Image (cartoon, coloured by chain):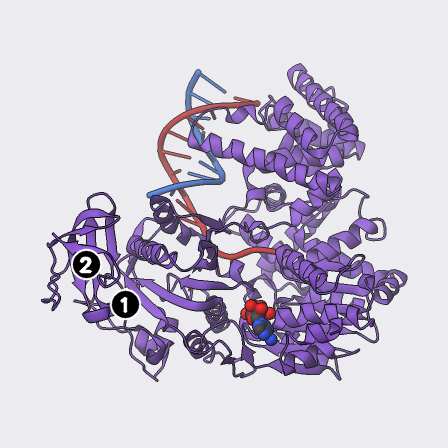
Chain colours: A purple, B red, C blue
Amino acid sequence: MDRLAKLLADLDEDQKQAVLHGEGPLLVVAGAGSGKTRVLTYRIAALLARGLAQPHEVLAVTFTNKAAREMAERVERLVGGGLRGGFVGTFHRFALQLLRNHPAEAGLPPRFAIADEDEQRLLLDRILKRLDIPAGRLSVRAARSRISAAKNALVGPGALASRARGDAERLLAEVYEAYEAELRTAGAVDFDDMLQLAVSLLERHEALRKGLAARFRWLLVDEYQDTNLAQARLVRLLGGKTPNLTAVGDEDQSIYRWRGAEVENILAFEEAYPGARVVTLGRNYRSTEPILRAAAAVIERNSRRRPKRLSSEVGDGVPVAVYLAADEADEARFVADEIARLRASVPAGEIAVLFRVNAQSRPFEGEMVRRAMPYVVVGGTRFWERKEVRDALAYLRLLAAPDDALAFRRAIHVPARGIGQVAMDHLEAAAAALAAALPAAARRLPEALSPRARQALAEFFALLDALRALAGSAPPADVVRELLERSGLAAQYAAGDEDDRSRRANLDQLVAAAAEAGERGLDLMSFLDEVALLTDADMRREGDAVQLSTLHAAKGLEFDAVFLVGMEDGLLPLRREGSSEADEEEERRLAYVGMTRARRRLILTSARVRRINGQLLAGRPSPFLLEVPREVVEDRAAAFGRDPFRAHAPHPFRHVAGPAASLAAAPFGPRTTDHGPRPSPKHPDGWRPGLKVRHATFGSGVILQVQGTGAQTRLVCFFDRAGRKTLIPSLAKLEKV
DNA sequence: TGCCGATCGTTTTTT
DNA sequence: ACGATCGGCA
Ligand SMILES: Nc1ncnc2c1ncn2[C@@H]1O[C@H](COP(=O)(O)OP(=O)(O)OP(=O)(O)O)[C@@H](O)[C@H]1O
């Protein structure tokens, strides 16, 4: 069998259509788990195998770096030789590479820096103070997000100013302009600039654009529903007159509207690319029928979508489970208990707990630790954003690019070396007077400084020079190690407490990352670029650990078992003041994405009360939860070991055709904090609460609660050694004492 | 200049 | 509840 036939054997008829499509624009739209990513990957492989494409002609864009890595590996395995010379990566990585190759044409210094979020905030803070804008008028946060939105929509400060209505918008435009000026003075770009500048680079340099369009003859973009205006423009520019563009996506999974994503890009693809072939895929290879039906019931209520049908190729399966928890602690205990049970048949790495906001991970982490179960948290404070790591990176940036003012401002203060506000003001003034980069001005040790500050500065630069000399000969890891020692960065965390130990561990991890980069032959600048683009999702460990992740970070992934937690009205869907109907639809898509990550088991949980910012808030179940058809839901009372509200709460699970709002309004019953055992009816097998029992592994204990009958019987027991367990008496080796 | 404690507000999601 | 930030003090 030749290579192509072998490839096609892994695909169904619709998928083949897409994979074998020749030249011209192609759109693959299909629901979750229908093999879109597989189609994209196989299409690359097929183009290579058929000799239609050369590896260096392929430009494939994925949503995360990790997805890129996997796609490249997959292609490599499918057709030996792989994609050498081609590009597989994120839009941001592509744009950065482009700008690094052509800094002058882009109007950037040769070794321009990438401003991280901290630095953006710092700049904006300075600007707002300078312009005397009180936080009430415009906060740093608001300014940052609105400038980011403008950039993603390809709106510059000038354009923003000219279209500004009212003082608030004029003020924003002014801040935006000052921000751009400061960034440029610092020789830096921010995250959003990468796309924007890449677009304007190609728009202004036709020869360059033509060259790239001619080289990258085959463009393939995954997750097209979450591309923004700048990204779509970039694709258009690279496509040229005869775009061989493959876009793959699902408007139901567009979850980055808040970041400038335009679902219109995929909904109006055929208008943007007339004559585009459209292939839809209707078979889901990931999830069981109940899971799919549950997810479909939720997403169907959205309006801006192409209706689609998805049939499960996996077939029937275990019903979707629902658990109503007393509070977030109970929810976490329940999930951890269930995970412990699942682990008998499912590897930890195939289990995910998905939540709407990072703050929800805490209780789950606690329960996982208590049970000594392996887990990783994805999202939250990312490794590369930790203070100790960023401090070290600031030094490294100064080694790679001595004029990096942003890095200088950070590094000069850690560890504290007697340079304070006064000294900094002198340095900034000197830099302005000399029209020099801040670090260059500082290196001249301006007279205005105190002797102490001059001494400190001299030592600082001596250290940098020594390290730079070392960087010329030694591998990156050695440089980092030396830096941590000689700068005193490591010594700051010498104490034995938990906090310091974790900071030291992070610094060790930085050394390890540098070592790994060195082995791949990356120089310091490339290492720093890579680090700037990495996210937590990219660092997802391959190891066998339960994944605690935000819904956003779970996009594109799949797990055997998924716990979608915190399904409360207001949390999922998250609602805050000013939330619109469109926001609500995005929340619904988020729920859909979460549910469709599951292969065989989907468990939805909701808490009656939840502590948010220290306050107890009573919630009602998410409307999404109530929309799940009753027939695909397990009778949770029999399925789970405890059900704290059975006695009080109406069963929230009724199949109702009416509007979600009226359902969500159903009262929850009286509040209770009683976690204790509940009286159980007499059980035919003689199990009763209070009965002493002995278990083969857990030892002796007592029954707290009896639920269900026959094969469905569950016993909640408390063991002297092992604590609280829920057991199935027909399976567990349990004897009455 | 740098450290400590009181005060404040808080992120929703991340390339 | 918690962490970041600001103001006062050494
Ligand atoms: N023809 C097929 N035969 C068997 N398995 C398939 C086939 N196509 C796809 N799959 C499997 O189905 C699962 C989902 O595929 P894939 O991730 O490509 O879907 P997707 O449409 O990109 O999903 P999503 O949009 O939800 O991220 C994967 O495990 C994949 O290996």
In the image, residue A697 lies at what x, y percent?
26, 48
Q: Which residue does the numbered mark 1 point to in the structure image? A: A639
| Mark 1 residue element | helix
Q: Is residue A641 visible?
A: yes
Chain assignment, label 1:
A
Tell me: is circle 1 under 8 Å from ligand 1. Answer: no
Identified at 66% across, 31% down, the residue is A480
Direction right: furthest residue? A207
**Residue occupied by mark 2:** A672
Apparent side of residue A436 relative to residue A340 in the rendered image (left or right): right
Does residue A364 appear left or right of residue A440 in this picture? left
**Which quadrant holds residue A422?**
top right
User: On the image, which quarter does residue A411 sit in?
Assistant: top right
Residue lying farthest to the front in this orientation: A1
Q: Are marks 2 and 1 in contact (CB under 8 Å)?
A: no
Question: x, y (%) of residue A532?
Answer: 66, 46
The kind of residue tagged 1 is: Ala
User: How many circles with numbers are drawn on the protein?
Assistant: 2
